[in-house]
Amino acid sequence: MNKLKKIWEFLINILHFILAKIFAFLKKDLTDENFAQIVQFLKFGVIGFSNNIIFFAFNLITLLALKKLSLSWDYIIANFIAFTTSVIWSFLWNNKYVFKLNENEKRSPVKTFLKTYIAYAFSGIILNNILSYIWINHMHISKYIVPLINIAITLPINFIANKFWAYNKKKY
């Protein structure tokens, strides 16, 4: 684990160097707070990428498992199973690495999980199924590709909902 930490620190230093040059070119200051927020978003993105692999894998596995039943709404079942699995995955990793608590801050893990589930429910079930219906039935895009398209829309929504609502901290 120590080796991974060194690699991560090395990557963070490279990122800081690159961003400092970009900010200097734009005649802006890269503050520690700005950099921390950028790193937080990148961590969320990395976990989100792994989360989407989990989602896509479970979606595909479910679609293939239901193929023999010839259900016209198999993609809804697949989205639901993939969603539930990916929310648990996302919560565990984001809670540990992205939205960490500082000293004198507390939050209820149960409330945070429920808020995470609700936030993802909007984008992962409601919005995802509405978009899937449109892409599949009106745009004639393959139901095997649609989840990849939906990611581009739901990822930023999820970050904002998680950062400012689900993982809200209380200072004591």
Image: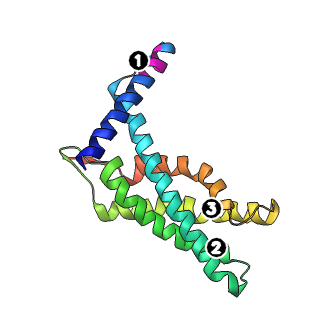
Mark 3 touches mark 2? (CB < 8 Å):
no
Q: Residues within 10 Å of mark 3 (few under 14, many from 20)?
A: many
Front one among 170 and 92: 92
Q: Which residues are magenta?
A: 20-24
Residue that label 3 marks: 128
The residue at the point 39 percent across, 37 percent down is: 39
The residue at the point 60 percent across, 64 percent down is: 126
- The residues bearing labels 1 and 3 have C-alpha atoms spaced at a distance of 38 Å
Marking on residue 76: 2
x then y, percent, for residue 63? 64, 75
x then y, percent, for residue 28? 45, 16
Mark toward the start of the polypeptide (2 vs 1):
1
Marking on residue 48: none
6 versus 32 height, above or below: below
Asked whether, in this view, residue 120 is left or right of residue 30, the answer is right
Quick one: SS at disc 2?
Answer: helix
Q: Amino acid at mark 1?
A: Asp
Marking on residue 29: 1
90 versus 82 height, above or below: above
- The residues bearing labels 2 and 1 have C-alpha atoms spaced at a distance of 47 Å
Asked whether, in this view, residue 106 is left or right of residue 38, the answer is left
Front one among 91 and 19: 19
31 versus 121 height, above or below: above
- The residues bearing labels 3 and 2 have C-alpha atoms spaced at a distance of 9 Å
